[in-house]
Image (spheres, grey):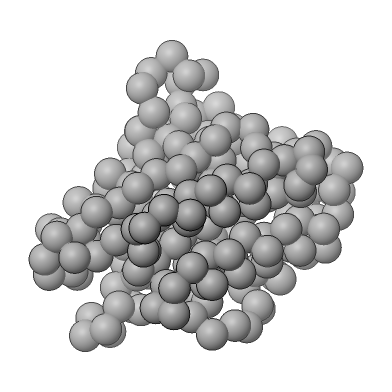
Amino acid sequence: MLDILCFGNSLTQGFWHYGLEEPHPYALALKETLVEEEIVEGEIEIDVEGKPGDLVNCPPGQFIDRMRRRLEGEKTYDWVIVLGGTNDLGYGSFSAESIYAGLQKTWSLALASSPTTKVLALTVPESAYVSTKLKRNRDALNKSILEHQEDRYFAFDLHSALPYRAMDDTIKTKIWDDGLHLTDKGYDMMGQLIARRLAELLPGTS
């Protein structure tokens, strides 16, 4: 049995089509890819904890408290996949350093939940919004995420793997929904990409 927690905000929940459609979390394609490509043998259980609009900076956000509450139960996760900071960056009032500090606290909670739990931190993807300040802060935050060193901590550069501006326009319309969120097909691509990163990290699959 492989137990995974996907933790974050709207991009983790699978928010799309302005909330008019049922959420389509990347966890669906993540599980499907892990099974179909025989990356994992045995059962896979994935929980999704995504709250649209939440902030890593607490207060006013509830990111850290949500992680703490999620981990209070008896269930132990093998992997906790964390994506956060998109909303903090969008507000423009939080520094990359403060967002990184909040993420570190979140990762630490997951790592402390059991001696075998591992964290896969995702970098913050692009959006359609153009801002020099936003790009500078996002680049700084993503650099910190990728360079962070800690036992049982791993990172995946989602920002590079799922670009907005560099993507072909035909593909972009199928993958990106409103310039911030993805379509159902976009979340499926996200799940497939994360599954292949996990394949590099899981024992016996590299």
Q: The C terminus is located in which quarter?
A: bottom left
Q: The N terminus is located in which quarter?
A: bottom left
Nearest to the observer: residue 55 or residue 11:
55
Please say whether residue 131 is visible from this viewpoint.
no
Please say whether residue 60 is visible from this viewpoint.
yes
Nearest to the observer: residue 96 or residue 1:
1
Nearest to the observer: residue 5 or residue 30:
5
Above or below, 5 relative to 202: above
Nearest to the observer: residue 99 or residue 186:
99
**In the orientation shown, which residue stands out farthest toward the top?**
20
Classify residue 51 as left or right of residue 61: left
What residue sits 46% from the left and 43% below the top? 49
In the rendering, at what x and y percent does residue 15 appear?
47, 30
In the rendering, at what x and y percent does residue 109 appear?
58, 64
Above or below, 22 relative to 155: above
In the rendering, at what x and y percent does residue 85 appear?
68, 50
What residue sits 53% from the left and 48% below the top? 69
